[in-house]
Amino acid sequence: MRLNLERELFLKSWQSVERVAIPKSPVNAASGILISADEMGRVTLEATDSKTTSVKCTAQGVEVQEAGLGLIPVTIVGSLLKKSTSKLTTLEITNERGVISSGRNKTKFSVIAPSEFPQIPKSDNAEFFCEMVLSDFMKLSVEGSSASSSPQDFPKYLGTCLLRNKDGVLKFVSTDGKRLSISELACNTGNERDVMLPAADLKDLARILTSEDLSQKIIITSDGATAWFKVDEIEFSIRQIDTTFPTYEKILNDTVMASMIISRSDLSAALDRVDVIAKNNTAHIVAFTLNPNDELQIIARAPELGTTTEFVQANISGEFMRVGFNASYLQDGLRALGQGDIKIEFSDPEGQARLYRNNDDSFLYMLMPARLTPQDYMDDDNLSSEYENNEVQNEFNNNEQDQNQDQNQNNNGEF
């Protein structure tokens, strides 16, 4: 095989594929990119992680001088292409040797036998699932997978994202038992069905596609075992997860005891500051005090370290409430919500909190609260005053002995 490469154009195609390959070893088949060139001048690049994800791309900026097939190590060739300053490069593969030439400069390298490349799934028999603008897909992926946990967790659904098309609406849903995220969009959908994918792979795909033209359409198909994502000349595949997703609709309720409209950036910045203390608390708790027609008070405490208090301007309505949250989980939801004002609905101090963009319910991030002890929501001045009260002193004495154990076991509510 002999190819003339217009380096910059070809490199764009190469980079769309190389992120899927695993650069473990130069002689490992999963660390290589399979290049096939036919007599019609079409060049295809393929890569896989040998587990759940693969990609196939029609390469641009290539002139085929001699057709053929080659499996070349991603790290070596990718680095040479990126570091080269030449506009035109020649790639030649013969038996077990490859050569990259730019003028008089030449690099020889070992290649892998193409027969060792894993067989990647083909979409020939896949059924249409949905079609949308790529920018919308990126938004759904980020929002809908924001409540997933590590894919190593059990049960399997904890590390998955559910893609559900129904009545012309596509939903991306994830949960880890303590939180739930749902992002939805009206789009062109096929037959009603569910597709469950590893959330980590879906996030990786969204990151890879950031370099593409976001105004393009993305088409998703599925054969029940694999889902394919086609954007222009690039086709990704992700192996589906065979498990049952919880009936999340039964979890949600519409009870509202208190609500708050607040700047997402102001709340996130305040949480960043109190996290200096909160992250030293085993349960990573921050305590909210919601006083209608007043500011939001946020307190974080860590044993033997200190207490921090922040006040954030907010529009609070409903009943007075104190409620606690895991700071990391709350920040995950705020990041997914993006910029602007957000609305938070609180069902009760021990019930779910529901986060939305203000005046936009297309994305919901639901979070269960953490159990608070009385000292969690007191600043140092109030705590000192309360200690002078014998009744409260007795309560604290009873709680202090097992506070850390109680927080470890109970501070993260589950639905």
Image (cartoon, rainbow, N blue to C red):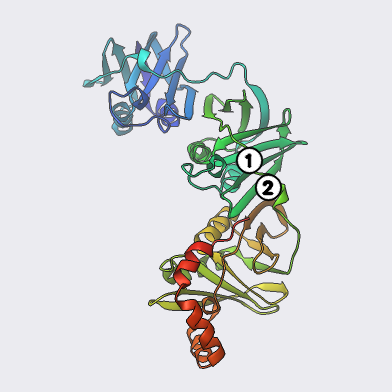
Mark 2 surroundings within 10 Å by alpha-carbon count, few (fewer than 14), some (14 through 19), many (20 or more): some
Residue 376 x, y percent position in the rendering: 52, 76
SS category of the residue bearing label 2: helix
Nearer the observer, 389 or 62: 389
The answer to which image quadrant residue 25 occupies is: top left
In this rendering, does residue 281 appear at all? yes
Residue 294 x, y percent position in the rendering: 66, 79
Disc 2 residue type (three-letter): Tyr
Find the distance from the CA under tag 1 to the CA under tag 2: 8 Å
The total number of labels drawn is 2
> Are the residues flagged by discs 1 and 2 in contact, CB closer than 8 Å?
yes
- Residue in the image at 69% along x and 44% along y: 247
Quadrant occupied by the N terminus: top left
Residue wearing tag 1: 245
Image height of 34 relative to 255, above or below? above
- Residue in the image at 58% along x and 61% along y: 413
SS category of the residue bearing label 1: loop
Horizontal side of residue 177 vs 354, given as left or right: left
Residue 8 x, y percent position in the rendering: 40, 29
Disc 1 residue type (three-letter): Phe
**Which mark is on residue 248?**
2
Image height of 80 relative to 115, above or below? below
